[in-house]
Image (spheres, rainbow, N blue to C red):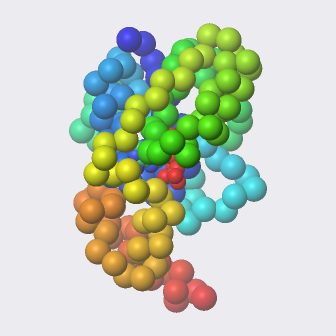
């Protein structure tokens, strides 16, 4: 089924993202997970750190590649010869802005289509924002982020608290 791109901020990758990545990798020959760098938004993790965390949690998935891009997603898709974007839908409230983005992307690159995968119900409440909230208060993160990165998320908050 060709090459697909799964774009997002992934600050940091959650179990909800990983669920979409695994399902996307089953459907498409190759799935490129792309950290979209927004110069106006400072994240918790740097783009390079987000890429590293994603690579670690997808290491066992041979047809998954992790990359980052600063430009327009449509240009990136053209460059990578991908014709499909994968997006995860959590709630009806995600739908409106996602449809709008899908239309804009196909306007910018007419061969580009967007495929939506519904969230697995157990992750419907999960976002990177929720993870950051929980980590800030020292909550157990094992239901939220992949095991391999729990310590990195905790360490980031420890570091931040010491700085500030
Ligand atoms: P967030 O900060 O909300 O987690 P991202 O920009 O990192 O957002 O998300 C990237 C993509 O992953 C989006 O298509 C988003 O809808 C999807 N996504 C995020 N969390 C989940 C989840 N828990 N289940 C399914 N899809 C998700």
Q: From the top left corner, tell me how far across and down residue 79 is, in percent.
A: 63, 20
Left or right? Give the position of 85 relative to 29: right
Image position of 155 with respect to 109: above or below:
below
* Residue 69 in view in this figure: no
Pick out the residue farthest to the front.
92
Quarter of the figure that contains the C terminus? bottom right
Quarter of the figure that contains the N terminus? top left
Left or right? Give the position of 11 relative to 103: left
Image position of 51 with respect to 100: above or below:
below
Left or right? Give the position of 63 relative to 43: left
* Residue 33 in view in this figure: yes
State the residue in front, 19 or 25: 19
Q: From the top left corner, tell me how far across and down residue 88 is, in percent.
A: 45, 38
Q: From the top left corner, tell me how far across and down residue 127 is, in percent.
A: 46, 56
Q: Which residue shows up at 46% across the image and 29% down it? A: 116
Q: Which residue shows up at 35% across the image and 17% down it? A: 29
Snapshot quadrant of residue 69: top right
Q: Which residue shows up at 51% across the image and 42% down it? A: 92
State the residue in front, 150 or 98: 98
Q: Which residue shows up at 52% across the image and 89% down it? A: 162
Count all numbered tags in the image, as a single digit: 0
Q: From the top left corner, tell me how far across and down residue 96 is, in percent.
A: 62, 37
Snapshot quadrant of residue 77: top right
Image position of 6 with respect to 107: above or below:
below
């Amino acid at each position: 089924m060709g090459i697909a791109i799964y774009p997002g901020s992934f600050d940091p990758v959650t179990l909800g993202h990983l669920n979409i990545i695994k399902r996307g990798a089953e459907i498409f020959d190759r799935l490129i997970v792309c950290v979209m760098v927004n110069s106006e938004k400072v994240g918790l993790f740097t783009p390079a750190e987000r890429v590293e965390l994603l690579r670690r949690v997808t290491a066992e998935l041979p047809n998954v590649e992790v990359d980052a891009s600063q430009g327009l997603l449509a240009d990136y898709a053209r460059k990578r010869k991908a014709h499909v974007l994968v997006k995860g839908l959590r709630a009806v409230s995600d739908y409106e802005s996602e449809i709008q983005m899908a239309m804009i992307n196909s306007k910018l690159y007419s061969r580009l289509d967007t495929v939506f995968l519904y969230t697995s119900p157990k992750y419907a409440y999960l976002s990177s924002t929720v993870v950051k909230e929980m980590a800030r208060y020292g909550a157990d993160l094992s239901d939220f982020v992949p095991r391999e990165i729990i310590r990195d998320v905790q360490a980031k908050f420890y570091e931040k608290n010491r700085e500030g």
